[in-house]
Image: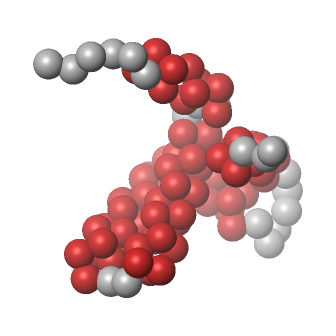
């Protein structure tokens, strides 16, 4: 069974190292961290708006946009899927007060 999050991370990594002129991911990564952070912020705000006032369908669509832009942001800092997975595993059985 395929892991869609891993697949997305791998696609972003592939686009990061490509010269595809039509790739939004390549373009975004080349524009740098300020643009990447701006896009993540915009998408996060859109998710909040749709969560509060939109339909379930639009909220799901915006959530996927946030995940994509978050993965681009992480990739731009050389953070990969395994880094995130390891951190999640560390936190799995941590009890919070």
**Residue sitting farthest toward the left:** 97
Residue 59 relative to residue 79: left or right: left
Image height check: is 67 above or below 55? above
Give whichever of 37, 70 is nearer the camera: 70
Residue 77: quarter of image: top right
Q: Quadrant of the N terminus?
A: top right
**Residue 14 drawn at (x, y percent):** 81, 47
User: Which residue is depicted at the point 61% across and 40% down?
Assistant: 75
Q: Can residue 51 be seen in the rendering of this structure? A: yes
**Is residue 61 found left or right of 18 in the rendered image?**
left
Q: Which corner quadrant holds the C terminus?
A: top left
| Viewer-nearest residue: 31 or 56 | 56
Residue displayed at 64% across by 33% down: 81
Residue at position x 27%, y 16% from top? 95
- Relative image position of residue 57 (x, y in whole percent): 47, 80
47 versus 96 height, above or below: below
Instruction: Give x and y (percent) for residue 47.
Output: 36, 69
Question: Does residue 35 appear anywhere in the picture?
Answer: no
Q: Residue at x 79, y 46 (%)?
A: 2
Horizontal side of 10 relative to 5 (left or right) equals: right
């Amino acid at each position: 069974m395929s892991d869609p999050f891993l697949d997305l991370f791998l696609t972003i990594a592939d686009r990061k190292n490509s010269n595809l002129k039509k790739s939004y991911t390549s373009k975004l990564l080349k524009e740098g961290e300020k643009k990447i952070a701006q896009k993540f912020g915009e998408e996060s705000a859109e998710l909040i708006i749709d969560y509060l006032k939109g339909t379930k369908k639009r909220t799901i669509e915006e959530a996927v946009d946030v995940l994509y832009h978050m993965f681009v942001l992480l990739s731009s800092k050389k953070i990969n899927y395994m880094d995130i997975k390891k951190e999640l595993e560390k936190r799995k059985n941590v009890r919070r007060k």
